[in-house]
Image (cartoon, coloured by chain):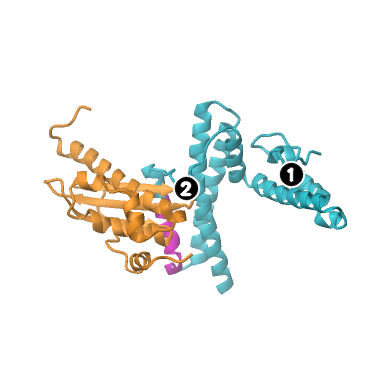
Chain colours: A orange, B cyan
Amino acid sequence: MAYSDKVLDHYENPRNVGSFDKNDVTVGTGMVGAPACGDVMKLQIKVNEQGVIEDARFKTYGCGSAIASSSLLTEWVKGKTLAEAGQIKNTQIAEELELPPVKIHCSVLAEDAIKAAIEDYSKNHAAGAGEEKKTA
Amino acid sequence: MPSDLSSNHFELFALPTSFSVEQGLLSARYRELQQATHPDRFASAPDQERRLALQRAAQVNEAYQVLKDPLRRAIYLLSLRGLEWNDEQDTVVDTEFLMAQMERREALSEVRATTDPLDQVGRILDGVGTDIRVMTEQLASRLLETDAAALAQAKDLVRRMQFLYKLRHEAQELEAELEDER
């Protein structure tokens, strides 16, 4: 199966590969896996006091489409608020990368990863900062 | 012996519909069924009969592939019990488990840079093999029960084991490559 030029570009020159310290309270870590293909994806965001994502990193073991989906996502979330980043849909990623139907699940994985990272950040931040903890 | 196209894989092999399968019996039945459905036997039979025999032979092969592999057998059994698999949407989010898998992937990708790559890949395979063995036993025990909680736990175990199978496959490929290079 042929990859699109955009997938190849991200695959050959992945953006923002690496890790942040997951214990840092300004960092949110999202880990997700796709059992059907065994892909594992880690997406991390670094968030400033205004709730804006300043930086992002990823590490993905999987096919070219999974790597491209997470690489693209790290570019997209930078500069976005948590709320905005949470709105990103897998269909947007699939469209941008021109993923074929059999690779749509890679974009689903990326969407789940950013959601998990945001959730993790919110949890850490509420606990770490020890301020106005929500009771819900 | 039933060879009705509508029978399930276990019935086709005249085995009880359960996770535990006697390997010796499975192989013996496979040989019998292969002989009974072999296309050569139907070379001079009417068209329709020949087509049917071909279909049966294909079904026998597919059933054997599923039944001999514990993971595929578990997935098939759970489907018979009404569980639905959505490979496109099902994701696993157990951070600790995934982190451990990622560390293993990293270790595997760095094997070539170590002083004794074959020994290193052997260690990884040992670890994965142990996990698979333990989880297969847990799966067997969950599959003895058919209540909703047991089904959900079995599905979760299958989902985890799929990562381990994939990792084992990649480690085995690397091991074969390293052995070829020696």
* Residue A59 shows in the view: no
Left or right side of B56 for A70: left
Q: How many marks?
A: 2
Report the quarter where the C terminus of chain B lies. bottom right
Q: Secondary structure at mark 1?
A: helix
Q: Amino acid at mark 2?
A: Pro
Residue at 13% across / 34% down in the picture? A131
Residue at 42% across / 65% down in the picture? A3
Decide: few, some or many residues near mark 1? Use Cα within 10 Å; few <14, some 14-19, many ≥20. Answer: some
Q: Is residue A99 above or below residue A122?
A: below
B24 or B87, which lies in front? Answer: B87
Q: Which residue is under mark 1? A: B26
Report the quarter where the N terminus of chain B lies. top right
Disc on res. A35: 2
Q: Position of residue B156 (x, y in %)?
A: 48, 38
Q: CA distance from mark 1 to mark 2?
A: 28 Å
Q: Secondary structure at mark 2?
A: loop
